[in-house]
DNA sequence: TCTGAATGTGACCAACGGATACATTGCGAC
DNA sequence: GTCGCAATGTATCCGTTGGTCACATTCAGA
């Protein structure tokens, strides 16, 4: 499997057509799409260019993706998969108080979003799940979200966080804040010099929310 | 001026070509664009259709807008103009404490965003101000933002809100929260039955932030 | 009234997303 | 092994879109 190219290894080099069949075109297309989106922006992204960049006619893409939107959904899903993995890592490896865990979680979220701004925009982009298309994308989003809910729940179980509202609501509050902040930074409404500064500035904004988490 | 149609009066009826020149095509196009965007979504919006809907060739649009993006920028600017007006209204007319004024401001923001979800998406859409195009759009955004800063400043002057961080930062915190919330609602990550419920739910999420505003 | 600037038209272009008929290939049944 | 079919990729076509340009029409000021 995966003879020619894998996600992240699609750097420019066209596999020079060693065989009629590609091997794992679906994955290669997602990789190419990711690269194009990150370099030229989601708006400029075209199916044809993605196909060409892996050495294949644009028609071939339709064997693996129903439409352009479906390919974008795959890119989005891949993003949520990586995000969930990172969040899960942070959640399990962070020692210390639940407060610190939440802070680390937020930092990981910001890091991901600011490292891959274009992909992040796809992940929040056009209505990808209109009428329940792409249930696997929906699941990937849920996975990422569940990590946050888990951390909140743990904080409650340890008696550090308040028990009302429920962990789910606390997680939503955090998501609202982090995402809103990312958007304002990405759209240059908040100007920060570096990613590190962005995270630091966020933490001061985030402090009231953290205080609000405290057990009453 | 404005002989044929004005923003908001472009309902379907084609002005049946009474004259070769339209009169105020720029405004009419923005109105038509708004209507199309709100009905079919920003992605499906086309310049040609907007031009056709006001009874004009698509080429004519280019006499008034450099590009499709420029037309979208105008739609966005119109949105910020209305938003700023509404916020200004609420800010000046709300009696009571500064807390209540901030709450009312947030409610007005949410109302606007949830009333015009598609336009709101354009307002946060593709990178419209890349490299400082559309300075007037930038100004419109600033106007809306300044209303919020003003309310925060007033709260500080009255000694109700803390003086650190500055009013500007407080306003940003509020913007982050409100916008993040709008996005989660619009993308159905937060499910609410009605706009009223959406605003109510927001206020519970928003409470910690309001508490954090308190003078120390 | 005449004339140039502003505005709208119509034809044209390249690129895109999508569909379809056809070519090539891998793989399981025999 | 080889045979046949399903999977995959190709070539070509189509309608639509954003954008340009030469030309037509109109308006307004001298």
Image (cartoon, coloured by chain):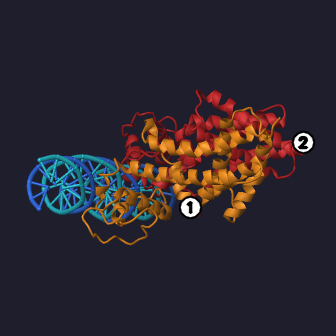
Chain colours: A orange, B red, C cyan, D blue
Residue A137, percent across and down? 47, 45
Q: Nearer the viewer, residue A14 or B161?
A: A14
Q: Which residue sits at x=29%, y=52%?
A: A63
Residue A197, percent across and down? 72, 62
Q: Are marks 1 and 2 on the same chain?
A: yes
Residue B63: quadrant of the picture: bottom left
Residue B158 got which mark?
A: 2
Residue B202, percent across and down? 69, 35
Whichever of labels 1 and 2 marks the residue nearer the N terminus, that label is: 1
Residue A184 in sight in this render: no
Residue A129, percent across and down? 46, 41
Judge whether B181 appears above or below A62 on screen. Answer: above
Tag 1's secondary structure? helix
Judge whether A174 appears above or below A190 on screen. Answer: above
Q: Nearer the viewer, residue B70 or B18?
A: B70
Residue C16: quadrant of the picture: bottom left
Judge whether D4 appears above or below B6 on screen. Answer: below
Residue B146 is left or right of residue B73, and the answer is right
Tag 2's secondary structure? loop
**Image quarter hosting the C terminus of chain A:** top right
Q: Nearer the viewer, residue D3 or B128?
A: D3
Total labels drawn: 2
Label 1 neighbour load within 10 Å: few <14, some 14-19, many 20+? few
Q: Which residue sits at x=45%, y=38%?
A: A130
Residue B79 got which mark?
A: none
Judge whether A61 appears above or below B81 on screen. Answer: below
Q: Which residue is mark 1?
A: B130
Q: Chain of mark 2?
A: B
């Amino acid at each position: 499997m995966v003879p020619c190219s894998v996600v992240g290894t699609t750097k420019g080099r066209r596999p020079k057509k060693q065989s009629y069949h590609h091997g794992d075109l679906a994955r290669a297309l997602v990789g190419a799409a990711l690269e194009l989106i990150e370099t030229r922006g989601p708006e400029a992204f075209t199916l044809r260019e993605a196909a060409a960049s892996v050495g294949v006619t644009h028609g071939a893409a339709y064997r693996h993706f129903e439409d352009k939107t479906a390919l974008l959904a795959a890119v989005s899903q891949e993003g949520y998969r990586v995000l969930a993995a990172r969040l899960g890592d942070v959640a399990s490896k962070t020692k210390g108080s639940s407060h610190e865990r939440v802070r680390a979680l937020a930092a990981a979220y910001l890091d991901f979003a600011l490292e891959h701004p274009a992909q992040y925009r796809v992940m929040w982009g056009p209505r990808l799940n209109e009428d329940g298309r792409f249930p696997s994308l929906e699941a990937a989003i849920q996975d990422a979200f569940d990590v946050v809910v888990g951390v909140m729940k743990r904080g409650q179980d340890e008696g550090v966080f308040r028990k009302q509202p429920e962990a789910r609501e606390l997680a939503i509050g955090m998501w609202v804040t982090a995402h809103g902040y990312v958007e304002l930074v990405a759209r240059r409404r908040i100007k920060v010099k570096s990613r590190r500064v962005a995270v630091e500035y966020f933490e001061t904004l985030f402090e009231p929310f953290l205080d609000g988490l405290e057990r009453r």
